[in-house]
Image (tube, rainbow, N blue to C red):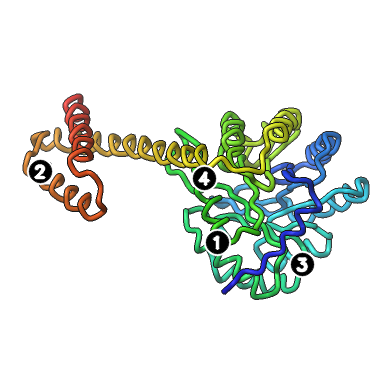
């Protein structure tokens, strides 16, 4: 199935455009103050979560229709603005249409469910609204494009992708989500017309990483950025650690505008992808050592020898076969495993 993407909607905004605002609408005073500050800083596209799909129950799940009423008040005050929010159900869509929300996005959890996407597509049939779709939480590009195809079936064409990264099990040590920089290239290969918006907030998970991600992203040429911003992040009920204040946001926006380039530096882009792969290797070694400690404790409690030559040699034999199959230099990579094994022995000896 050939995709039918209309990217003319991006011409409403100057590239790169910025979608900014709180993760979720909570208290009226914080919401109104945030929008006021952002408007003064020439932000005209605002994000504002109305319904929040939380990982665990009994947490704040959004202010619901009350927040849409507040958006209506703000839209009367400022005529040249756009609002974006996340939708997942028929009720969400009906209310967003009622309150004239301009941009709807489909969240990462929803993208993974073809049944939900099919329903959303049906409810939005023939819509002229801008529909943004976040990549799934795991790295599966075909699932993302399957969702876009389902939207296309019902004549939904004003589509864009939000690149929000993919799940990182070690998010306490590094970014909340891996950027998956290769996503940009994969998307453009499948469809060069589709606009891509980077979400450094959800990739970072912490304020301190946002600038680093933005800086790296400028090697590419994203159509826009969606950045979580709150007048008082410490008071936020959702994603408080990754929301930034409007003044800091303005610094980042000015930096992006100054450094932005429509041309992609292919050499730097490939280096960026290599760096991400290397970070994953390092985190996997960290996870490996964590499991080694557990093995060491079991061996100590059961008086099992730390070094077991037969088991190690069998592992090397299996690795050798696999390396041969995928055509990698066998002896050089086996040296790496021998080094890892020495580290493993040292860890177990220290227990």
As measured in the structure, the alpha-carbon distance from the residue carrying label 1 to the one carrying label 3 is 32 Å
Rendered position, 182 above or below 298: below
The quarter of the image holding the N terminus is: bottom right
Q: Nearer the viewer, mark 3 or mark 2?
A: 2
Percent of width and height locating residue 23: 68, 44
As measured in the structure, the alpha-carbon distance from the residue carrying label 4 to the one carrying label 1 is 15 Å
Rendered position, 61 above or below 155: above
Q: Do the numbered discs 2 and 1 sit on residues whose CB atoms are within 8 Å? A: no
Percent of width and height locating residue 173: 45, 33
Rendered position, 235 above or below 130: above
Q: Nearer the viewer, mark 2 or mark 1?
A: 1
Query: Which residue does the numbered mark 4 point to in the structure image?
Result: 181
Of the numbered discs 4 and 3, the one sitting upstream in the chain is: 3
The quarter of the image holding the C terminus is: top left
Q: Nearer the viewer, mark 4 or mark 3?
A: 4
Of the numbered discs 4 and 2, the one sitting upstream in the chain is: 4
Q: Quadrant of residue 340?
A: top left
Query: Which residue does the numbered mark 3 point to in the structure image?
Result: 94
Element on which disc 3 rests: helix
Percent of width and height locating residue 305: 8, 35
Relative depth, front residue between 266 and 77: 266
Q: Is residue 86 left or right of residue 344?
A: right
């Amino acid at each position: 199935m050939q995709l039918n993407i209309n990217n003319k909607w991006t011409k409403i905004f100057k590239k790169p455009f910025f979608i900014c605002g709180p993760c979720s609408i909570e208290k009226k005073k914080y919401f109104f103050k945030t929008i006021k500050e952002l408007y003064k800083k020439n932000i005209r596209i605002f994000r504002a979560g109305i319904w929040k799909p939380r990982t665990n129950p009994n947490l704040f799940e959004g202010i619901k229709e009350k927040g849409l009423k507040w958006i209506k008040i703000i839209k009367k005050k400022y005529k040249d603005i756009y609002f974006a929010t996340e939708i997942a159900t028929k009720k969400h869509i009906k209310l967003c249409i009622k309150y004239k929300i301009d941009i709807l996005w489909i969240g990462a959890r929803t993208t993974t469910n073809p049944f939900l996407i099919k329903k959303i597509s049906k409810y939005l049939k023939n819509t002229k609204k801008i529909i943004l779709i976040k990549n799934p939480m795991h790295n599966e590009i075909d699932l993302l494009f399957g969702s876009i195809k389902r939207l296309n079936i019902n004549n939904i064409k004003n589509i864009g992708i939000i690149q929000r990264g993919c799940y990182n099990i070690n998010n306490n040590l590094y970014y909340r989500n891996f950027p998956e920089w290769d996503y940009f290239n994969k998307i453009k290969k499948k469809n060069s017309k589709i606009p891509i918006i980077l979400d450094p907030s959800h990739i970072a998970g912490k304020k301190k990483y946002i600038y680093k991600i933005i800086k790296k992203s400028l090697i590419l040429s994203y159509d826009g950025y969606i950045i979580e911003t709150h007048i008082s992040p410490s008071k936020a009920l959702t994603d408080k650690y990754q929301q930034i204040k409007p003044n800091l946001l303005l610094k980042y926006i000015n930096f992006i505008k100054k450094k932005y380039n429509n041309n992609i530096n292919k050499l730097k882009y490939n280096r960026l992808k290599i760096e991400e792969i290397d970070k994953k290797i390092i985190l996997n070694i960290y996870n490996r050592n964590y499991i080694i400690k557990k093995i060491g404790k079991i061996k100590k409690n059961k008086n099992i020898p730390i070094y077991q030559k037969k088991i190690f040699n069998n592992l090397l034999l299996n690795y050798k076969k696999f390396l041969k199959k995928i055509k990698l230099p066998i002896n050089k990579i086996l040296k790496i495993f021998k080094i890892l094994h020495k580290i493993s022995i040292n860890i177990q000896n220290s227990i």
